[in-house]
Image: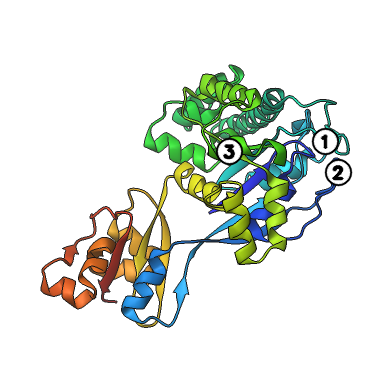
Amino acid sequence: MKLGMVGLPNSGKSALFNALTGSRVASGNYPFSTIDKNVGIVIVGDPRLQVISDIYESKKITHATIEFVDIAGLVKGSRDGSGLGNKFLSHIREMDGLVHVVRCFEDENIPHVDGDIDPVRDMETIDMELIFADMEQVNKRIEKVKKENKSGKGGREEIALLERVMGWLEDEKPVKTMEITLDERVVLGGMGLLTFKPMIYVANISEEDYECIYGDNPKNSVIVNMRKYLSDKYSGNEEVFVVAAKMEEDLLDMNDDEKLEFLEEIGASEPALSKITAAGYSALNLMSFLTAGPKEVRAWTIPSGTTAHRAAGKIHTDIERGFIRAEIVNYDVLVEKGTYNACKDAGLVRLEGKEYVVQEGDIILFRFNV
């Protein structure tokens, strides 16, 4: 899973990137202090793996990972090449989803590119730049399909879809809010449309405003307005995650005991990473299944709704090709019974075929022959 971090310059993207990945990239107080993209791999912590490892006495634990990419800031006119726009757009087309960091903090030492703090305006700026960029992309695709089908017979269905998408974008609505079929989703998914990608919204506040994060206290009217904007635009299907990126970045200089003590003092149960990785899984409709044995316990990330046959291919194409069956035990059942053999003796290991839909927490042994 690749998540690209986007937002206006000086929104705190690099500070949040550092906090999430443990990196030390430049976090300047001037626009475009990030020029080239920065990439960091983050382990998705899963306490179940250690429990399973203890049961199997495994030699190795391998967690799922997320790749975060910190990308140069976007400004008004980026789709026309303003700022570092063209480079920005080429980078984010590669991402599976986007993390939109919105500046909600005041700091006279860090200028805002538009002169003052207005998160809703900034969100609209990013939204419109992505919409305009998609319009250009769709228009190019329409022209290409027409050129490839000069007789007028081929490509009619695709052109009809693209023209419908163009109308949607002209109404200033993101493509992901359209009602489309599965086949249409496949067509659009291959175009790298920016407004088709899942988006996680992060309100970057100051340390002084941090208390509004963890107690359901919506006193911060800025956050309330952001949530209303998204509710109006996406019919209530989007959430705003509130973090203090600079403070999260400062946690890098603390050892584990100091981090725990600090988080307890401010009433936080976990750092920002846990919330954002969980949001990433949810936004991209992902889940994990597990494999276990004496050599390794491992979490594998797959889209929700994946069949056992396709999940096998996540491990190796040979396993998918030679699939015979999946032997599955539920994590909670394994923990209750204590061993795999005890689950088997109790008739709690299920035998499933190719079309079985994998569930979160399934521990799977694939049988195959090639």
Horizontal arrangement in the rendering, residue 63 relative to residue 138 (left or right): left
How far from the left and from the top, in percent, is residue 84? 81, 41
Location of residue 158 in the rendering, given as x and y in whole percent from the top left corner: 48, 31
The correct choice, above or below, for 28 with respect to 181 in the image is below
Closest to the observer, 123 or 336: 336
Q: Which residue is mark 2?
A: 29
Q: Where is mark 1, residue-wise?
A: 107
Mark 3 secondary-structure assignment: helix
Question: Label 2's element?
Answer: loop
Residue type highlighted by circle 2: Asn
Residues at marks 1 and 2 touching, judged by CB atoms closer than 8 Å:
yes
**Front residue (pair 54, 368):** 54
Q: Nearer the viewer, mark 1 or mark 2?
A: 1
User: Does residue 65 show up?
Assistant: yes
Callout 3 touching callout 1 (CB < 8 Å): no
Question: In the figure, residue 191 lies in which quadrant?
Answer: top right
Question: In the rendering, at what x and y percent does residue 307 appear?
Answer: 29, 55
Point out the image quarter for the C terminus.
Answer: bottom left
- Amino acid carrying mark 3 in the image: Ile
